[in-house]
Image (cartoon, helix red, strand yellow):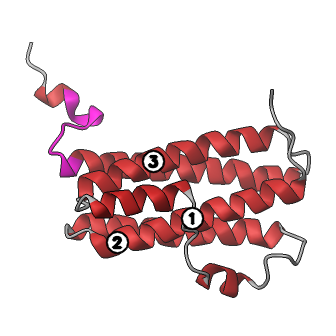
Amino acid sequence: MTKHYTLQEALRLAIKSEKDSMDFYRKAAELVTDARSKEVFTLLAKEEVDHLKSFYGLYQWEDLGPIDAFIATPPDKLSATHLALEKAIAADTTEKVALEIALKEEKAGIELYQVLVQDITDQQVKHVFEAVIKGTQGHYDLIEDEYMRVMAMVHSSDQNIYVRE
């Protein structure tokens, strides 16, 4: 059974999700040693801020306070993203592990936004959610490409070059 979200609930959930992702990418950028992976995580953190600002612009309630103050709040130590990162840090995080966590989080984000967008009737808000789904899919694809590079894997677009007949 699908939960029907109010506009306020959907936007608050989206804002929190984007904040958690931003915090994760900022921390991952600090932890990884590979320069390209660091660049990817830094870019993703900036894009999560853009998503967060899109949702914040639509949020009509004042319970979250000013956006800059909200962005500056410490990470939610109980979020699944933060807990996964803490576990990875304890296990001597590598680019591979950080990218694997990022892939899982982006996929979960896509699934969450697809559920939320179904219940939204406000077309402006629906459009923002649809744009974020598209952006999040782009993040997933970027992370997947970086994961393949780090793991020295063949990307699907290059597969025909390496397949022997």
Which residue corresponds to mark 3? Answer: 140
Question: Residue 133 vs residue 140: left or right?
Answer: right
Q: Position of residue 141 (x, y in %)?
A: 42, 46
Q: Quadrant of residue 56?
A: bottom right
- Count the labels in the image: 3
Question: Residue 148 vs residue 104: left or right?
Answer: left
Give, as a three-letter code, the residue at label 2: Ala
Question: Mark 1–mark 2 contact, CB under 8 Å?
Answer: no
Task: State which region is magenta.
Answer: 149-159
Question: Residue 60 vs residue 136: left or right?
Answer: right
Which residue corresponds to mark 1? Answer: 20
Badge 2 density bin: few <14, some 14–19, many ≥20, Cα 10 Å: many
Q: Position of residue 42 (x, y in %)?
A: 40, 72
Q: Quadrant of residue 111?
A: top right
Picture disc at residue 29: 2
State the SS at label 3: helix
The reply to whether the magenta stretch includes residue 152 is yes
